Image: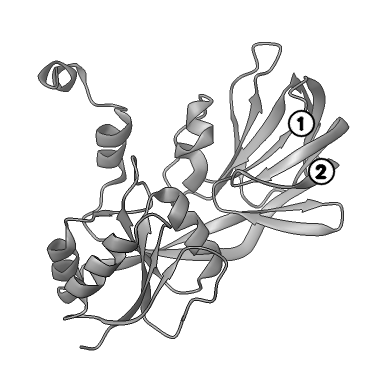
């Protein structure tokens, strides 16, 4: 028994965490079992097993500096690769050295004198849901103006989250780009803009706006600066994982007409 792991679970998955610990415990030394919240997680181990949906993985990723293996208990699971009933498959992948590390970068926003880091996205919007004018400047380039409810800035990891529901582009996770998308714009400007992650993005609003970081309110400001964060998180995934298969199976994107007919 060479590998060690901590198990981090969603609050309603206590039973599943205990059962998983019993099954895996014969092959991997479990050093801790705890809920995915702001409590101290023992990181003196090789990896963390996270039980929940993508939201639980997001919480854990901000707490941990060790690789994460996700077991999905949610609906989609872009970040959690294994189902709870696939323990044997996970153990086979572990023993056969088929798990590879995939580093994912975060986005950083400066609002007033503080910095916040997001894995999926940052939303800069009017709290009253009334439209406002936003100016977006990319380094020293000419600014762009939008009359909208807000602006969404997403990472490649976040392209299949809120960005997808707004009609943004799907970005392969290993790409080094930001995606900027106006939220409910007045004119027909609902196309996203994709820019290199080396750029600094400045967004100015006419009125004070609310900032959401991965869906959580982080404060208010009339101006934010967006850059690539120095922070990363690491996922452990099987080397045969196929991002496009997940798109077809979970989102239905690119599934084809025949598959739609077969599933009726």
Residue at horizontal 72%, vertical 23%? 149
Q: Quadrant of residue 230?
A: bottom right
Q: Is residue 241 above or below residue 251?
A: below
Q: How would you rate the neighbour count of disc 2 (Cα within 10 Å): few for under 14, some for 14-19, many for 20 or more?
A: some
- The disc at residue 220 is 2
Q: Is residue 126 above or below residue 94?
A: above
- The disc at residue 61 is none
Query: Residue 119 location, x and y as percent?
Result: 55, 53
Label 1, label 2: how far apart the Cα atoms are: 9 Å
Residue at horizontal 29%, vertical 62%? 15
Q: Is residue 221 above or below residue 233?
A: above
Q: Nearer the viewer, residue 215 or 257?
A: 215
Q: Identify residue for label 1.
A: 127
As helix, strand or loop, the secondary structure at mark 2 comes to: strand
Quick check: can you spot residue 34?
yes
Quick check: can you spot residue 237?
no
Query: Residue 7 location, x and y as percent?
Result: 36, 71
Asked if labels 2 and 1 touch by Cβ distance under 8 angstroms, the answer is yes
Q: Quadrant of residue 204?
A: top right
């Amino acid at each position: 028994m060479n590998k060690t792991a901590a198990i981090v679970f969603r609050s309603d998955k206590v039973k599943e965490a205990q059962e998983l610990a019993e099954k895996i415990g014969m092959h991997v030394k479990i050093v801790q079992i705890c809920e995915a919240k702001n409590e101290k997680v023992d990181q003196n181990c090789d990896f963390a097993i996270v039980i929940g949906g993508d939201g639980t993985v997001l919480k854990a990723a901000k707490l941990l500096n060790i690789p994460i293996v996700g077991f999905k208990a949610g609906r989609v699971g872009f970040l959690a690769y294994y189902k709870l009933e696939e323990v044997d498959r996970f153990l086979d992948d572990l023993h056969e050295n088929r798990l590879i590390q995939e580093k994912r970068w975060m986005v950083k926003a400066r609002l007033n004198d503080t910095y916040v880091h997001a894995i999926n996205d940052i939303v800069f919007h009017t709290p009253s849901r009334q439209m406002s004018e936003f100016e977006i400047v990319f380094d020293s380039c000419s600014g762009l103006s939008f009359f909208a409810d807000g602006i969404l800035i997403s990472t490649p990891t976040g392209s299949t989250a809120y960005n997808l529901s707004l009609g943004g582009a799907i970005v392969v996770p290993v790409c080094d780009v930001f995606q900027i998308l106006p939220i409910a714009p007045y004119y027909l400007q609902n196309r996203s803009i994709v820019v290199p992650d080396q750029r600094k993005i400045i967004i100015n609003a006419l009125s004070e706006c609310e900032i959401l970081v991965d869906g959580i309110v982080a404060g208010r400001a009339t101006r934010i600066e967006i850059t690539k964060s120095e922070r990363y998180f690491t996922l452990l995934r099987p080397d045969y994982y196929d991002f496009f298969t997940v798109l077809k199976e979970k989102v239905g994107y690119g599934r084809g007409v025949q598959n739609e007919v077969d599933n009726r």
